[in-house]
Amino acid sequence: MAYSDFTLEKAATDLGITTQEADLFPQLVPLPIPAWLDETLKKRTQLFLISEKARSEFIIAPILLACRDISQERLAIFSGQILDVDPSQGLIGECDFILALAPPLPPLRRRSPS
């Protein structure tokens, strides 16, 4: 089963994950949106995109790049990374995006069983 087959409800049931409402970043101060991001997102609406994946990439990738710019390049962005964590639990497959602190880390790999 791939990550995309999980729902929040399935993750809660199968993996014992719980959720709760919280103010995750209480000290976060809004920053202005870069002008190029606004222009890019407006142009996206002019394109005929045939797949859900393409539509999401044209929205999410520019936003993540703006976050990287704002963070002074302290954000590493991995796209389409295979992350087979635990095949027995169905935690396998390709992640849309993984965010990490920069500088970029070596390629992500599943740890070999000991």
Image (cartoon, rainbow, N blue to C red):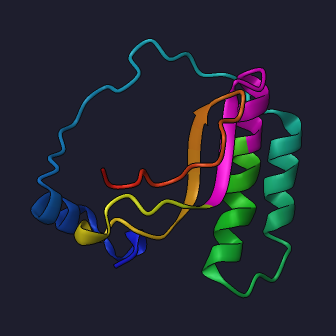
Seen in the picture, residue 94 relative to 60 is either above or below; the reply is below
Give the residue drawn at x 81%, y 83%: 48
x and y, in percent, of residue 80 in the image: 63, 63
Snapshot quadrant of residue 54: bottom right
Read off the magenta span: 65-80
Residue at the far front: name it.
114
**Left or right, 64 with reference to 7:** right
x and y, in percent, of residue 30 in the image: 59, 22
Q: Quadrant of the N terminus?
A: bottom left
Seen in the picture, residue 49 relative to 111 is either above or below; the reply is below
**Left or right, 12 with reference to 3:** left
Seen in the picture, residue 41 relative to 89 is either above or below; the reply is above
Snapshot quadrant of residue 88: bottom left
x and y, in percent, of residue 99 in the image: 58, 41
Give the residue drawn at x 64%, y 75%: 53
Seen in the picture, residue 90 relative to 12 is either above or below; the reply is below
Residue at the far top: name it.
27
Give the residue drawn at x 50%, y 17%: 28
69 falls in the magenta region: yes
108 falls in the magenta region: no
